[in-house]
Amino acid sequence: MRKVFFFALLPLTIFAAEKDELFKKGYEVYKRSCSACHVEYMSPQEIRKIRMTVMRGGKPPISAPPMNEVSARVKHFYPNELEFVEFVKDYITNPSREKGVCMPMAFKLFGVMPPIGKTLTEEEKEAVAYWLYHRYKETWRGMKREMMGDMKGKMMGR
Ligand code: HEC
């Protein structure tokens, strides 16, 4: 009985060292295949500045949403890790406006991303999606609050 239990759980159990490997591999994939468009991190304040520029008719200095924003936004819709990973693997392979959960403004500004996942192996897609889930701790609500807080502060002369 014990044996059955152990083997049943085995496929779900990725040991800490392997998770570390997956995370590192995911970062390599990010640097090679995603970083040309997605910057790794941008503070909510910087993102807000870019939004203001765009609202005034200016051009954004980036060509895709920053990865911390992408991670928080996708987690807002797919909080479960397995569903998040499945969504990302599928989206980067067959992206479309209908499936996408980015802000409407992102689609308007940058268009739908290219199917870059078609150039990656199944393992590389898994790794980069895993990395994207675990690399960031910010929540979408938290990011929005920071952007709003900053805006209120500015209006009140702070
Ligand atoms: C040529 C530029 C480009 C590259 C390279 C690129 N992306 Fe994107 N990505 C975009 C743009 C533009 C958007 C926003 C529009 C959209 O969601 O399709 C986006 C959006 C996303 C989203 C959010 C999808 C949604 O729900 O709307 C995810 C997740 C994502 N990218 C992951 C990746 C990963 C992982 C890689 C690398 C394997 C990558 N991207 C490489 C341009 C790019």
Image (cartoon, grey):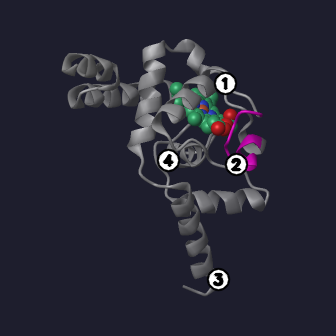
**SS for callout 2:** loop
Q: Earlier in the sequence, mark 4 or mark 2?
A: 4
**Secondary element type, mark 3:** helix
Q: Is residue 17 left or right of residue 63?
A: left
Q: Which residues are magenta?
A: 98-107
Q: Label 1, on which residue?
A: 114
Q: Quadrant of residue 107?
A: top right
In the figure, 48 relative to 2: above or below?
below
Q: Residue at x 26, y 16 (%)?
A: 4
Mark 2 Cα-neighbour bin, 10 Å: few <14, some 14–19, many ≥20: few
Q: Are marks 4 and 2 in contact (CB under 8 Å)?
A: no
Q: Residues within 10 Å of mark 4 (few under 14, many from 20)?
A: many
Name the residue that disc number 4 marks. Answer: 68
Say which element carries label 1. Answer: loop
| Quadrant in which the N terminus is drawn | top left
Point out the tag, 4 or 1, that comes first from the N-terminus.
Answer: 4
What is the distance, in whole Å, between disc 1 and disc 2 at their CAs?
A: 17 Å
Residue beneath disc 2: 103
**Residue topped by disc 3:** 155
Q: Please tell me which residue is depicted at 56% across the width and 68% down the height of the picture.
A: 145
Q: What type is the residue that disc 3 sits on?
A: Met
Q: CA distance from mark 3 to mark 2?
A: 24 Å
Residue 157 in the magenta stretch? The answer is no
* Secondary element type, mark 4: helix
Image-quadrant location for residue 24: top left
Q: Earlier in the sequence, mark 1 or mark 2?
A: 2
Q: Amino acid at mark 1?
A: Pro
- Residue 113: x percent and y percent? 67, 30
**Closer to us: 103 or 82:** 82
Give the quarter of the image for residue 47.
Answer: bottom right
Foreground tag (3 vs 2): 2
The furthest residue to the front: 1
